[in-house]
Image (cartoon, coloured by chain):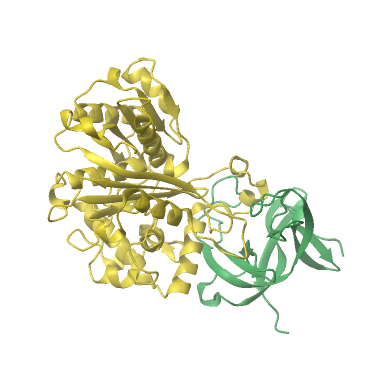
Amino acid sequence: MTQDVAIIGIGLHPFGRHDTLTGRAQGAIALRAALKDAGIGWDRIGIAYGGSHDAGNADALCNDLGLTGLPFVNVANGCATGGSALASAVSAIRSGAAEFAVAVGFDKHPRGAFNPHPRDWGLPDWYGETGLMLTTQFFALKTRRYMHEHGITEDALVRVAQRAFRNGALNPQAWRRREMSYAEIAESMPVNLPLRQYMFCNPAEGGAAVVLCPAEVAKRYHAKPIIVKAAVVRTRHHGSFEVFSPALAAQQAPAPTVTASRAAFEQAGVAPRDIDVLQLQDTDSGSEVIHMAENGFCEHGEQERLLRDGETEIGGRLPINTDGGCLANGEPIGASGLRQVIEICTQLRQEAGARQVPGTPRLGYTHVYGAPGVSGVTILQR
Amino acid sequence: MPHPVLASPDLIRFEGDTPHLVGSRCNECGEVYFPATDSCTRCTATRMSPHDLGHRGTLWSWTIQGFLPKAPYNSGETAETFQPYGVGYVELDSGIKVESRLTVADEAKLQIGMPLELTLIPYRRTDDGEVHTFAFRPAASA
């Protein structure tokens, strides 16, 4: 019997552009905020997991917080860095390795699309040199095929972005806080068709941290602890359609999102219909549409109707990305997955202000997906 | 006729003047790869043989690259001279889908399922002349 683990502290340095702050400084601000929320000092943390893609080693945070001698593991799992850090922290507490653990992430990226180097990904130089190794191309190619197979139209892509910016406008910590009209999104600059400028999130900056402890003692530290019912990371199988693939296998296999999601629901002993509020990776509109079905929240092809009928709005049956998601917050890779977790904790604590989902949400869900085919899912319970 | 200078000569073999893509095939399970690999991610075997993937296929998915990629893209274009280019996955006879540049970058002329054939296009100019890469173009009608 594994013991339950709870989140007792959350801290966010808002995402966006912060020219006067390093990425690490934003991580330190988030981490101090999370410790304050939990009401404990850094010296009580027994293990830490953290990551940053472009802003240095996460364990350099010890130079800010204090050199307490704790084991601090640097995590580098692309967009799934936060989810991987969280899953590791949960395992550490379950195993008894520590009573208090931290998962933290921060980042600071240059403007414009990411430009990965082929050799870092086990790929030949020509793949990058001849203009085929772009994440935006992958999202467009996967979306185009998905639309073709499942009868989705551009209408769904526009509605995802429109809802993200509408929710972002309600979130004081969001980066993009301006609502956009349907036409403004639908007629924005083609980036990688069918995806346009306002259907893509931007690389950004920010920090996010959570403090965890065994659930049985959590109430001593926070009045509203959030139980981690599942925290699962999975990588791709042969045949799944992944970013940075010079070729795809003849026989397709389910995405790592599908396997991570199924494992998480099994671990938590709940089903998609039980989830009250959720975060799905929305690097772009198309990805969110695909992830709705890959995570089990609808059938393939059903998304367009759900979006059109308002089911995914804050007041709908399936509220998605209530804080504006990656589209309105941007994506600091190291911090992004933990931002999702923090938003779900905020919703389950019923402290989300103007963007609070109605009723008394009990179960929340987060999902990240990143290169080169890794997915992290959590299921959280009030 | 001399063959063009290629960014990646190992990917192509010529049958007369017709370029074919070259990949590899697993000696154990028969899975096909592009580019050629020395291990099989399907069955984990490590004995592979070179495999001719042919030169014809159909368009499986497509996009149009609408902005100038950063390095390591090395076409030499600037934001001012950049021309959007097509990118697609092309399904070949074996069922493998190969990611490739497309000679067409007009959304009105691209459709999933359309027949395509392999060609070589100049994508970069150096002091020694043009460098080519592989691309697919609409197939000439039979």
Residue A349 image point, x, y percent:
16, 43
Pick the residue in front: B127 or A252: A252
Pick the residue in front: B129 or A98: A98
Place residue A60 in its image quadrant: top left
The residue drawn where x is 54% and y is 68% is: B61
Task: Locate residue A31 relative to residue A121 in the image: left or right.
Answer: left
Quadrant of the frame with the C terminus of chain A: top left
Residue A168 image point, x, y percent:
24, 52
The residue drawn where x is 68% and y is 77% is: B139
Place residue A317 in its image quadrant: bottom left
Colour seen for chain B: green
Above or below for B23 versus A118: below
Task: Locate residue A95 relative to residue B139 in the image: left or right.
Answer: left
Above or below for A369 versus A139: above
Above or below for A211 versus B25: above
Residue furthest out toward the bottom? B142
Place residue A24 in its image quadrant: top left
Residue A180 image point, x, y percent:
26, 60
Task: Locate residue B142 relative to residue A81 in the image: left or right.
Answer: right
Colour seen for chain A: yellow
Pick the residue in front: A276 or A42: A276
Above or below for A92 versus A251: above
Can residue A367 be seen here? The reply is yes
Counting the numbered discs, the total is 0
The residue drawn where x is 64% and y is 47% is: A123
Quadrant of the frame with the N terminus of chain A: top left
Can residue A10 be seen here? The reply is no
Residue B111 image point, x, y percent:
54, 76
